């Protein structure tokens, strides 16, 4: 009986906290924190002996995605969440650059393919150009079991150009990232009810998988490996 009262008081506390915080939730959702890591297997790769420019299209670098939260049929109406905002472009771009410095002897980030003087000055063996093809995020919260699921379908197109900007090689990389978050019955973790689950891991997983798959394709490319031969 004492246990039932304790649970009841806790739930009333959570509801009260929610009602006093709802005003803070009416505005725009802060960016979801993303912190992907590179696949550890990348560090076992023998770098290609190439000096390469890394060009990532500005639309990818600046890509931000807002995703609404879905609930199951048992979802309680007063759980109101604003859209979740994912700064995907900045995160993915930085990890592609980090991966490139592992795969190639030297990787130089370039902002434009039109600056021929700069490209010639660096004596590049080629340019890796990246653009976003698709980014689809689905967020689903199963209130009945206090479980949140995130899925991220992410794909890019990658091209390897010679110093004269002729295409040597191109490919597409598509992956699916998944994330899972649970809430416990502990009072200190009940903030989840008012601020929402942690959906960043779904995007982190997709970025990790994509950079590894891209690295594998670059290493396996005969067209790229034969450039110095």
Image (tube, rainbow, N blue to C red):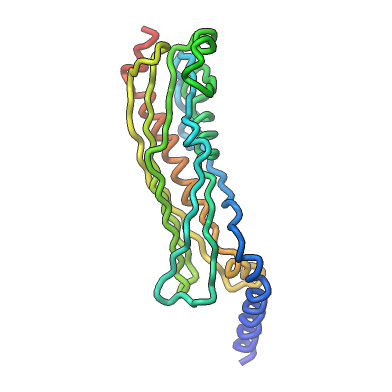
Q: Position of residue 133 (x, y in %)?
A: 37, 38
Residue positioned 50% across, 51% down in the render: 201
Q: Is residue 23 left or right of residue 162?
A: right
The quarter in which the N terminus is drawn is bottom right
How many callouts does the rendering have?
Answer: 0
Q: Nearer the viewer, residue 42 or 223?
A: 223
Residue located farthest toward the bottom when viewing the structure as drawn: 1
Q: Residue at x 54, y 52 (%)?
A: 85
Relative to 105, say whether 170 is above or below: below
Q: Position of residue 105 (x, y in %)?
A: 50, 17
Identify which residue is drawn at 37% across, 32% down: 157
Q: Is residue 91 visible?
A: yes
Q: Residue 117, relative to residue 77: is it above or below?
A: above
Horizontally, residue 100 falls left or right of residue 155, namely right
Q: Is residue 207 left or right of residue 155?
A: right
Q: Position of residue 178 (x, y in %)?
A: 43, 52
Q: Give the answer, above or below, for where 165 lies relative to 68.
A: above
Relative to 33, residue 210 above or below: above
One can see residue 40 in this view: no
Q: Residue at x 49, y 53 (%)?
A: 66
Q: Quadrant of the C terminus?
A: top left
Measured from the top left, where is residue 227 in percent x and y? 37, 11
């Amino acid at each position: 009986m004492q246990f039932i009262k304790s649970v009841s008081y806790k739930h009333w506390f959570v509801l009260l906290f929610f009602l006093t915080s709802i005003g803070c939730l009416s505005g725009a959702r802060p960016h979801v924190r993303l912190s992907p890591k590179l696949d550890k297997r990348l560090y076992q790769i023998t770098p290609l002996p190439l000096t390469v420019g890394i060009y990532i299209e500005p639309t990818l670098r600046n890509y931000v995605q807002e995703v609404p939260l879905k609930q199951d049929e048992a979802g309680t109406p007063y759980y109101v969440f604003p859209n979740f905002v994912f700064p995907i472009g900045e995160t993915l771009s930085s990890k592609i650059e980090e991966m490139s410095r592992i795969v190639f002897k030297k990787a130089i980030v370039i902002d434009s393919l039109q600056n021929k003087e700069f490209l010639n000055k660096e004596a590049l063996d080629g340019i890796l150009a990246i653009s976003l093809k698709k980014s689809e995020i689905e967020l689903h919260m199963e209130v009945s079991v206090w479980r949140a699921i995130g899925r991220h379908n992410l794909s890019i197109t990658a091209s390897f150009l010679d110093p004269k900007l002729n295409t040597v090689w191109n490919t597409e990389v598509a992956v699916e990232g998944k994330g899972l978050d649970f809430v416990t019955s502990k009072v200190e973790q009940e903030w989840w009810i008012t601020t929402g689950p942690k959906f960043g891991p779904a995007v982190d997983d997709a970025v990790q998988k994509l950079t590894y798959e891209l690295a594998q394709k670059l290493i396996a490319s005969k067209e790229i490996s034969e450039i110095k031969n």
